[in-house]
Image (cartoon, rainbow, N blue to C red):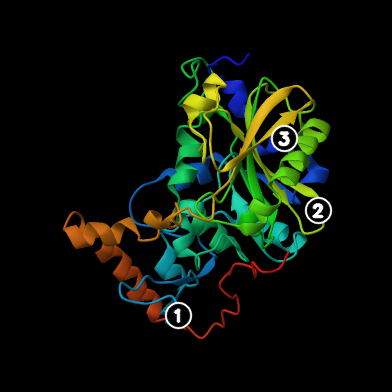
């Protein structure tokens, strides 16, 4: 019998990267955790004109309102080289050195996140990718993300004991750099565990149809059940949680992330009313499974008749400053942006950006 529960702070803390990574290190992507000083956390939370720290360089593609995806976009290089031009910029030389070293140790490219979230909503500013090869790209993504701001201010918002001592501001914040892996979205699955029993599995990229999921749905359900039962269930501290798993080409599974069991986590093809009550509605595009031999669960996936939908992060791809400018709400921000561009255009822009835009792998391959 499943019953609704109230989320506790400890449930959220258990899903914090540094709390679960040491336990499941052999089953996930190699990563480095860097503790953050309070002054850098304050910098991430500051509002107003974007000012990058001294000593970083970032290659970005400026948004063009009428450009197609195939059209070459204008490249702008932001550099902080002259003391007279960056005297007001913050300086985080120790952190930049730590990020540089971590990137080198992780093979030259990484994707960043904080304790819980990654800056997926800010990929528009980094060639539509989380892939970073320099400290500047990492910092620019973090600074531009609302998801990261949520981590820093509202991680315990839905906890029933959020008013008790020890809020988010009392936590030592951390930057996580994970070795870059070109993951295929159709191989990731979100699993919902309640009372340490697997209740539901959802295709993670739930707005797209993948024929191999349809073909192998029963086998996938069995594999995911076995992995959670044998690897995760007895080691993870919370009774209720959500875990994202990725099936590699060799058939093994990676743990991508843990998430709290509650509305702050996207329920994808389920609803939180179903999951909280433990009473799953009948669904045509699903297959039933047994977990640990006695618990009924359901694996849901997109069908071939489903209407394909755009990415859930599409609304984040246009900078808010452009929206404000088009509506006349706040032109000052855009003026500041153009002023920064003009200053940097006077510097050398001959640097070669050899990093290619990330593309989906060939879906015809197994």
For disc 3, the marked residue is 20
Foreground pick, 301 / 98: 301
| Displayed quadrant of residue 51 | bottom left
For disc 1, the marked residue is 70
The residue at the point 46 percent across, 60 percent down is 52
Q: 10 Å neighbourhood of mark 2: few (<14), some, or many (≥20)?
A: few
For disc 2, the marked residue is 251
Name the image quarter holding the N terminus: top right
Question: Looking at the image, is mark 2 or mark 1 earlier in the sequence?
Answer: 1
The residue at the point 49 percent across, 37 percent down is 152
Is 275 placed above or below 23 here? above
Name the image quarter holding the C terminus: bottom right
Kind of element beneath mark 1: loop
Alpha carbon distance from label 2 to label 1: 34 Å
* Residue 89 as seen in the image, left or right of residue 190: left
| Residue 213 in the image, given as x and y percentages of width and height | 65, 52
């Amino acid at each position: 019998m499943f019953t609704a529960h109230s989320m506790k702070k400890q449930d959220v803390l258990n899903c914090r990267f540094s709390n679960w990574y040491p336990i499941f290190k052999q089953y996930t992507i190699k990563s480095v955790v860097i503790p953050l000083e309070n002054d850098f956390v304050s910098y991430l939370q500051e509002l107003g004109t974007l000012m990058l720290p001294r000593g970083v360089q970032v290659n970005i593609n400026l948004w063009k309102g009428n450009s197609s995806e195939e059209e070459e976009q204008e490249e702008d290089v932001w550099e902080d080289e002259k003391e007279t031009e960056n005297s007001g910029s913050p300086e985080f030389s120790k952190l930049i050195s730590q990020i540089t070293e971590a990137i080198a140790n992780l093979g030259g490219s990484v994707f960043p996140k904080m304790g819980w979230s990654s800056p997926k909503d800010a990929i528009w500013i980094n060639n539509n990718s989380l892939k970073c090869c320099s400290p500047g790209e990492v910092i620019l993504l973090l600074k531009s993300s609302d998801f990261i701001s949520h981590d820093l201010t509202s991680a315990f918002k839905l906890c029933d004991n959020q008013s008790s001592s020890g809020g988010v501001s009392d936590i030592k914040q951390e930057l996580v750099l994970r070795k870059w892996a070109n993951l295929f979205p159709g191989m990731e699955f979100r699993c919902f565990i309640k009372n340490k029993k697997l209740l539901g599995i959802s295709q993670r990229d739930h707005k797209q149809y993948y024929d191999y999921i349809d073909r192998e749905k029963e086998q996938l359900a069995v594999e995911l059940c076995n992995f959670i039962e044998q690897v995760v269930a007895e080691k993870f501290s919370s009774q209720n949680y959500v875990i994202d798993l990725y099936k590699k080409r060799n058939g093994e599974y990676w743990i991508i992330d843990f998430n709290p069991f509650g509305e702050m986590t996207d329920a994808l093809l389920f609803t939180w009313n179903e999951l909280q009550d433990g009473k799953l509605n009948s669904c045509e595009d699903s297959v039933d499974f047994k977990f640990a031999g006695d618990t009924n669960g359901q694996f849901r996936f997109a069908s071939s008749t489903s209407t394909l939908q755009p990415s859930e992060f599409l609304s984040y791809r246009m900078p808010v400053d452009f929206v404000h400018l088009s509506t006349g709400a706040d032109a000052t921000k855009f003026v500041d942006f153009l002023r920064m561009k003009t200053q940097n255009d006077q510097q050398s822009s001959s640097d070669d950006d050899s990093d290619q835009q990330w593309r989906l792998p060939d879906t015809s391959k197994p």
